[in-house]
Image (tube, helix red, strand yellow):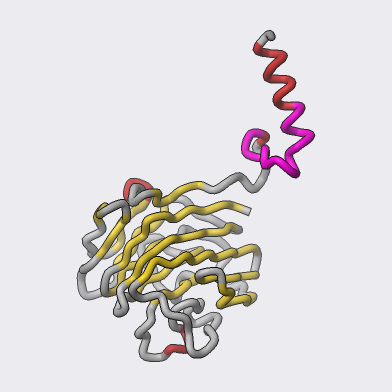
Amino acid sequence: MDIRIRTALRTAACTAAVALSGCAGMMGGSGGGWVPLVDGGKGLEKFNRVGEADWALVDGALQATRGGSTPAYLVTRESYKDFVIRAEFWASDDANSGLFMRCQNPTQIGDETCYEANVFDQRPDPTFGTGSIVKVAPVRQPPPKAGGKWNTMEVTIKGDHIVVMLNGEKTVDHRDRKFASGPVALQWGRGTVKFRKVEIRTL
């Protein structure tokens, strides 16, 4: 069969089935599919480094165990508005880490300029411990624990609506209009943190 005919038939089939078969990636569309940021520990080249931490690829994960006197970050070179981000991570019991989103200044990352989905089991004030959005949406008490195991965190931000899921449990469902768009970042604050898979899907 002529290649042009095959292409036309394939496009027609995809158009008809897009709602059920997930052909949106072929057709373009506004959302797109999952884009890996970290996959099997690979992905350092997709980030800019802010601060000092010993980020390295170790046993299929992107890992940091020590740094300077202040937290360090891996910051995406792309900015995002409405999206879902999903991270598979391991944290030591004393770890301070998290996902920072819609950051306003890619060189100055923090909970005042980004939404921070926190990973901090030993935070002195547990109101904004693991599973919260720091200074925006508290987590139920006692907060969930992430230390000493692999976890999955998924954050959906669409407009002013923020939902955080940790290991399949909803920890935040909140509305806030503070930040509209910006890059995302992975944090090392203390302890050991590992990211073996991080992916993002625009909405």
View extreme (right): residue: 16
In the figure, residue 160 lies in which quadrant?
A: bottom right
Left or right? Give the position of 123 relative to 8: left
Total numbered circles:
0
Name the residue: 47% across, 81% down.
Answer: 144
Asked whether 149 or 72 is in front, the reply is 149
Name the residue: 45% across, 60% down.
Answer: 87
Asked whether 33 or 116 is in front, the reply is 33
Magenta region includes residue 15:
yes
Q: Quadrant of the C terminus?
A: bottom right
Q: Relative to 40, say whether 23 is above or below.
A: above
Magenta region includes residue 175:
no
Give coordinates of residue 14: x percent, y percent: 72, 32
Q: Quadrant of the N terminus?
A: top right
Q: Relative to 85, say whether 94 is above or below.
A: below
Q: Relative to 25, say whether 62 is above or below.
A: below
Left or right? Give the position of 134 relative to 156: left
Give coordinates of residue 149: x percent, y percent: 37, 70
Give coordinates of residue 156: x percent, y percent: 59, 64
Residue bounds of the magenta highlight: 12-26
Name the residue: 67% across, 42% down.
Answer: 22
Give coordinates of residue 74: x percent, y percent: 35, 59
Q: Relative to 149, say whether 94 is above or below.
A: below
Asked whether 72 or 57 is in front, the reply is 57
The dominant secondary structure in magenta is helix
View extreme (front): residue: 149
Name the residue: 29% across, 66% down.
Answer: 72
